[in-house]
Image: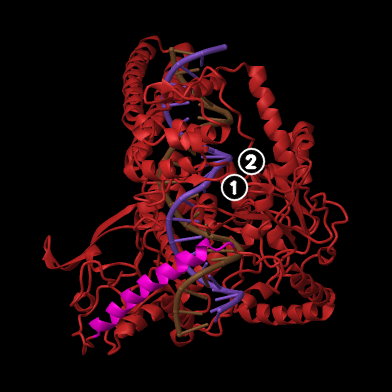
Chain colours: A red, B brown, C purple
DNA sequence: GCAATCACTTAGCAAAGGGTCC
DNA sequence: GGACCCTTTGCTAAGTGATTGC
């Protein structure tokens, strides 16, 4: 959790107080009532999606508008104007999507930024051919207009194989060129849609369904009360789900077992139901052994068999893993439908163990262009619906039976549609950077407000939506924080006004922290806790909707989430500046990078369970370090004797020997240093997950700029997938990029 | 005005992949 | 070439926030 309590200035007496404890009681009653109603609603089957006709006609209108060049022209003019305004002397580097133009930089005007809509219009026009809806053919990626990169950008950077210019291609030889004939499409150099539509043309093959149930061989038996019992196919399938999880802690939990048993019985025939009445009498061990043996056999497969499977997967990927969106072939993130199984909620989830049912074509809604070749349902089946909604990005959706929520098939993070959104997210966070001081000053003022509502929102800058009791695990965010989650200490560990937080956040990850705050914040919290029970909401006058509405007023596009992105990115940038020493070698610099990344992960509370093999792997590494140390002392000894030898002999040969021994020592020292750095890094990373912040919160341009500045190959920071996701940043960020 | 719904992002875990070492 | 171990990828749950509709 990244709150926004980074100040420590003067303490001001808290103002008058409004007693409104009765009101929050009302709120609670209300909650209960809502909860019941909602449950009923959920049980009703919804048939909302059938009015596609209406959508079609509105789409037609929309298209007509699109084809009209007028609007586009107006946009272009506006953009030109804005571009000129934004060039207040400083050239903007981020390909025209630089810091949104400010009216003026005085603090007073800080909130005065252009809306996201305006932001979009800052971009250049899309290619003419993009305004056509039919894909004439899949574009052979060959971006002639793409600006030429500086040669030094390209060195050492593998993904550039895809984007490399002809000169490089020639130098690299023809083999590779043959392998990767396509150039990567630089969508970030093209115009974005400004009308809220996400695409003009979308064609795909639909989802891949889970394979049908393959019954157990007759020798693998299920036992009830010590006797073998032949289950029917339906009950057997569900039993195998449990058997596969037998090793897992889940199956020992009461709720899990209870939920599983209840749902399992629903799948039984009346005979089975009559017989199987007690889960403790069920013996799944033979099934479990069978699956273990199967997975072992899979590992032992011959190369050829493995290759065959790999090829089959590749074929599926090629057929179903891509779609055509607006003339471009784009990778789909999850083209497989989630297979049936037992629901594994996180934390103390009340629904864990419930049966996640098999999804059939009749459950599937397809979204694609009207004029595309529609995906075909498996023979003898029908889709639930085929719609043509270009205001959304998903290709396939279905409703899941555990929570009744909708699941989607969407595009890969490397796609244009995801990349644009990601880029925009960081631009919003950068806008916040420019007015964060003003916003902070304002909410500090709000702490004095007479209105409880205003005081509360001023304290809470992180979201935390309401959740339904009994539907999910009990986790909270800022707005849903309860009295029991904080403790106030006028003095603790030598510090004044300490707030101790202890609660379960997203994914039931514990957040525990002691934060010294200003007196006024402290007093306010005391006030909010007055006359409340531990289970009452701390911020009873606040919810995410009120909070975000308020934030919107402070800055266009500002939501609680933006603070998280901003805090994370700004921290990375600061930490990198602080931690990177110019004289360090590359491994040491990378350690500094990881430490900066780690600071962010800690800030965002991105924890992980220490890997099971952690201790062992540390031991191994230590062993390597010890061996390297021995090797080093040997090498040093050898060098010493070589030097002595050279002193006596004074010939070329022995001089050379000294040189080569020197080099050996150097090499070993470097290797040792690398290992030691690795050990430090690993140790420090034991319980911290870097990936989440790297992937979701850190403006990649900061990292790319840092790499360029210090001559670090970008592959040392981002792996292949990450480079694909951040291709836009890798292409556009220069070494002097400032978040 | 507000709950419900929908769309989309963020999250950690576990299996798979693949490099290294013997 | 097989075991081992780290990294990557896939999976899907769990959030946020905007929109819808009563």
On the image, the x and y values in percent for residue A94 come to 61, 65
Place residue A14 in its image quadrant.
bottom left
Which of the two residues, A525 or A557, is positioned nearer the viewer here?
A525
Cα distance, mark 2 to mark 1?
9 Å
Q: Is residue A679 above or below residue A335?
A: above
| Magenta-highlighted residues | A20-45
**Residue, x 63% and y 39% (percent of image)?**
A210
The answer to whether residue A645 is magenta is no
- The 10 Å Cα crowd at callout 1, few under 14, some 14 to 19, many 20 or more, is many
Asked if one can make out residue A698 in the rendered structure from this viewpoint, the answer is no
Task: Name the chain letter of the residue that bears numbered label 1.
Answer: A
Q: Residue at x 28, y 58 (%)?
A: A503
Residue pointed to by mark 2 = A158
Mark 2 or mark 1, which is nearer to you? 1
- Chain of the residue under the numbered disc 2 shown in the image: A
Q: Is residue A545 above or below residue A108?
A: above
Q: Evaluate if marks 2 and 1 touch, with contact meaning CB atoms under 8 Å apart.
A: yes
Q: Characterize the local packing of mark 2: few (<14), some (14-19) or many (20 or more) Cα atoms within 10 angstroms.
A: some
Instruction: Name the secondary structure under disc 1.
Output: helix
Question: Split into 4 quadrants, where in the image is the N terminus of chain A?
Answer: bottom left
Q: Picture quarter containing residue A286?
A: top left
Does label 1 lie on the same chain as label 2? yes
Provide the secondary structure element on which disc 2 rests.
loop
Residue drawn at x 43%, y 44% is: A262
Residue A439 percent location from the top left of the image:
40, 79
Residue under numbered circle 1: A723
């Amino acid at each position: 959790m990244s709150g926004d309590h980074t100040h420590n200035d003067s303490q001001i007496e808290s103002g008058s107080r409004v007693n409104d404890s009765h009101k929050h009681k009302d709120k609670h009653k209300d909650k209960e009532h809502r909860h019941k109603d909602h449950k009923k609603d959920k049980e009703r089957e919804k048939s909302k999606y059938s009015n596609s006709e209406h959508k079609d006609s509105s789409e037609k209108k929309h298209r007509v508008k699109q084809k009209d060049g007028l609007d586009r022209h107006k946009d272009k003019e506006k953009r030109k104007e804005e571009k000129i305004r934004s060039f207040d002397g400083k050239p903007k580097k981020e390909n025209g999507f630089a810091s949104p133009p400010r009216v003026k930089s005085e603090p007073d005007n800080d909130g005065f930024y252009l809306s996201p809509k305006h932001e979009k219009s800052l971009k250049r026009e899309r290619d003419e051919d993009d305004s056509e809806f039919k894909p004439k053919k899949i574009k052979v990626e060959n971006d002639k207009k793409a600006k030429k990169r500086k040669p030094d950008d390209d060195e050492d950077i593998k993904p550039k194989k895809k984007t490399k210019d002809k000169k490089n291609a020639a130098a690299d030889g023809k083999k590779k060129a043959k392998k990767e004939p396509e150039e990567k499409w630089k969508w970030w150099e093209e115009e974005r849609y400004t009308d809220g539509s996400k695409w003009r043309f979308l064609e795909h093959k639909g989802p891949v369904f889970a394979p049908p149930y393959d019954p157990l061989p007759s020798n693998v038996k299920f036992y009830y009360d010590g006797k073998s019992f032949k289950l029917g196919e339906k009950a057997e399938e569900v039993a195998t789900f449990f058997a596969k999880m037998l090793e897992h802690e889940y199956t020992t939990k009461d709720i899990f077992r209870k939920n599983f048993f209840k749902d399992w019985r629903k799948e039984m025939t009346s005979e089975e139901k009559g017989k199987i009445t007690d889960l403790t009498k069920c013996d799944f061990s033979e099934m479990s052994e069978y699956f273990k043996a199967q997975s072992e056999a899979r590992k032992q497969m011959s190369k050829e068999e493995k290759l065959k499977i790999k090829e089959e997967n590749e074929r599926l990927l090629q057929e179903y893993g891509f779609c055509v969106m607006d003339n471009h072939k784009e990778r789909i993130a999850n083209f497989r439908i989630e297979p049936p199984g037992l629901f594994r909620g996180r934390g103390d989830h009340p629904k864990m163990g419930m049966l996640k049912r098999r999804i059939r074509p009749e459950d599937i809604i397809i979204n694609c262009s009207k004029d595309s070749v529609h995906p075909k349902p498996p023979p003898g089946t029908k889709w639930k619906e085929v719609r043509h909604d270009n205001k959304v990005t998903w290709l396939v959706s279905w409703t899941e039976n555990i929570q009744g929520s909708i699941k989607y098939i969407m595009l890969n993070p490397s796609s244009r549609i995801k990349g644009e959104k990601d880029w925009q997210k960081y631009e919003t966070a950068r806008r916040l950077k420019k007015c964060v001081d003003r916003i902070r000053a304002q909410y500090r003022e709000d702490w004095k407000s007479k209105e409880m509502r205003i005081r509360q929102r001023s304290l809470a800058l992180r979201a935390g939506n309401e959740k339904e009791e009994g539907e999910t695990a009990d986790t909270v965010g800022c707005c849903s924080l309860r009295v029991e989650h904080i403790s106030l200490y006028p003095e603790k560990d030598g510090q004044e006004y300490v707030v101790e937080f202890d609660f379960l956040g997203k994914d039931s990850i514990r957040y525990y922290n002691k934060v010294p705050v200003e007196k006024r914040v402290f007093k306010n919290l005391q006030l909010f806790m007055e006359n409340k029970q531990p289970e009452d909401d701390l911020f009873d006058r606040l919810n995410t909707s009120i909070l975000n509405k308020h934030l919107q007023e402070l800055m266009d596009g500002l939501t609680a989430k933006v603070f998280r992105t901003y805090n994370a990115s700004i921290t990375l940038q600061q930490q990198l500046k602080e931690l990177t020493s110019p004289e360090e070698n590359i491994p040491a610099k990378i350690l500094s990078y990881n430490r900066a990344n780690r600071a962010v992960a800690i800030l965002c509370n991105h924890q992980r369970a220490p890997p099971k093999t952690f201790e062992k792997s540390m031991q191994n590494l230590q062993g390597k370090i010890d061996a390297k140390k021995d090797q080093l002392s040997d090498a040093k000894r050898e060098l010493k004797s070589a030097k002595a030898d050279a002193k006596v002999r004074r010939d070329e040969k022995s001089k050379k020997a000294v040189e080569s021994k020197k080099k050996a020592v150097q090499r070993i020292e470097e290797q040792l240093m690398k290992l030691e750095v690795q050990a430090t890094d690993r140790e420090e990373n034991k319980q911290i997950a870097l990936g989440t912040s790297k992937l979701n919160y850190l403006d990649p341009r900061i990292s790319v700029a840092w790499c360029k500045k210090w001559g670090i190959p970008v592959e040392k920071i981002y792996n292949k997938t990450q480079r694909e996701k951040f291709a836009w940043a890798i292409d556009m960020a220069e070494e002097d990029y400032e978040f």
